[in-house]
Amino acid sequence: MNWLAAPALPLDEAGKYVAAAYIVFLALILIYVAIMAAKLVRIDRELTELAEEDE
Amino acid sequence: MIRAATVILRKDLLLEWRTKEAVPAMTLFTITVYVLFHFGLDRDSLDGALAAGVLWVTLLLASVIGVTRLFAAEREQGGIDALLLAPVDRTALFLAKASALFLFLVAVEIVAVPAFDLLLLGPGLGGTLPELPLILLLGNLGVSAVGALVAALAAETRTRELIVPLLLLPLLVPLLISCAQATEPLMRQDQGPEDLGRWLGLLTLYDVVFVLVSVAVFDFLLED
Amino acid sequence: MYSKGLVPLAAATVVAVTTAFALVFFYAPLDGDQGFIQKVFYLHVPMAIVALGGFVAGGVFAIRHLRSGDPSWDLRSYVAIHLSIILGLGVLVTGAIWAKASWGHWWVWDEPVLVSFLVVFLLYCVYFPLRFSIEDPERQARYSSVFAITAGAFVPLNFTAVRLAEAYTHPRVLSQTGGSLPGEMRLTFLVGLVAMTLLFVTLWKFELTAKHAALQLSRLRRRRADREAVAA
């Protein structure tokens, strides 16, 4: 990492990039949770079907 | 084990000699890629890093064909089951397949490297002479070890033709780096070998690691 | 089976991630040369380290799977690689953002760690097509494990090769890593690393639990179908 030799950006410029990086991370985690939620919904539906068939 | 490997290797070489499938196709492919590079780069002659890069990228792309076809004979004739039913040591099978690929690559390079000199290389092959064959041999060793492993990994998948290049080419990146970097000074106009030892060392390390890994994991492939 | 300790782990993750973000923005001093953009470091580098750790862990689980033949180790390996791919995508995107802000380009080839990471990422992306084009479950697990071990051995080799190549074409005097950071920055970085590791382990256990539940459900269905076939 050669970041010590890189030029400094003014705060208002850099702020946007830092925010973008952290938003990417947050979005990644949220998309993952959403996909896992979709899978959970399917498990729940199949489990309900199985329970109803048993009645 | 060596005897079993020799038997399979002889069968593979005989089959290749009779059908002439892999080696002519790979050779033809390299010449075609040279033509593509000639037009794509719009250059009549190459030297230095560009020459080394074009040569090695072409050879590695050609090796994809060889790897895709490595278990083709067994698959098409149902021979893979026969091979697996016979109590053949997996290490022997790996050695045979890797050696076959190694010999195919040598055969391709005997034509493809002089053809590269003829068609594209500016400074001429003379200046590369003691070192380039050594780099080619060490490179082939690595490609053969990784190639045999990738061929076996992809042998049982439905989408073999897709898996082989996608798997093989990233795995060959360190090999491409060391081979191209080692070849580059030899193909410069004002040549003089630099740092050859470092790249040959890295290449040897790559070869050793992948021969060992392949031997270690090959037992778990192609078994039933 | 996989869910043991998931709840306290999730709680610890919440605390660690919140602390890490608070430290990044309210405690760590502004970098003298890079200024505010250096704050990406506390996200990007721990994410890269944890993703690589996940790939290596996937290889270790794969070895245990091949040794024991227990498919649960293959499931652990699969989920570790899956999560590392997701984090890996984050590493590449945040790396590109950092490069754009620092050097004005979205991608720089003379950053050996990022370039190596791209090659490793491309290789591991093939894990999924390979795995899902093998139908027999036992063979699928075995071949996936062989891939995970091979790719695990490839990771350090690739990093060495790319670093050598880039050092050769772009000689540089200064090479800065976490080792020589000033105290407050180092503390922030270490807390970030711990938080990222906890997040990874929590999500790993979470996904394993979900996968396990789905497997149990299909087992139940199969058994019911068998019973009905016998009754009819």
Image: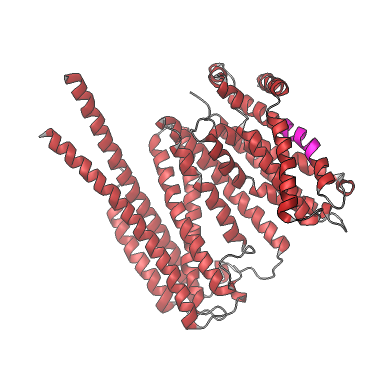
Residue at point 66%, 19% (across, down): B4
> In front here: C96 or B57?
B57
> In front here: B42 or B209?
B42
Residue at point 48%, 23% (across, down): B224
- Regarding residue A32, the answer to whether it shows in the image is yes
In the rendered image, residue C72, in percent from the top left (x then y), is placed at 38, 38
In the rendered image, residue B170, in percent from the top left (x then y), is placed at 60, 47
Residue C51 located left or right of residue C165:
left
Compared to residue B153, the image places residue B124 above or below, namely: below
In the rendered image, residue C190, in percent from the top left (x then y), is placed at 46, 66
Residue at point 42%, 52% (across, down): C83
- Image quarter where the N terminus of chain B lies is top right
Residue A42 located left or right of residue B196:
left
- Regarding residue B53, the answer to whether it shows in the image is no
Residue occupying the far right of the picture? B126
In the rendered image, residue C97, in percent from the top left (x then y), is placed at 51, 68
Residue at point 41%, 74% (across, down): C23
User: What segment is highlighted magenta in the picture?
Assistant: B103-112
Is B109 in the magenta? yes
Residue C76 located left or right of residue B84:
left
> In front here: C150 or B82?
B82
Residue occupying the far left of the picture? A55
Q: Main secondary structure of the magenta part?
A: helix
Is A49 in the magenta? no
Q: Quadrant of residue B5?
A: top right
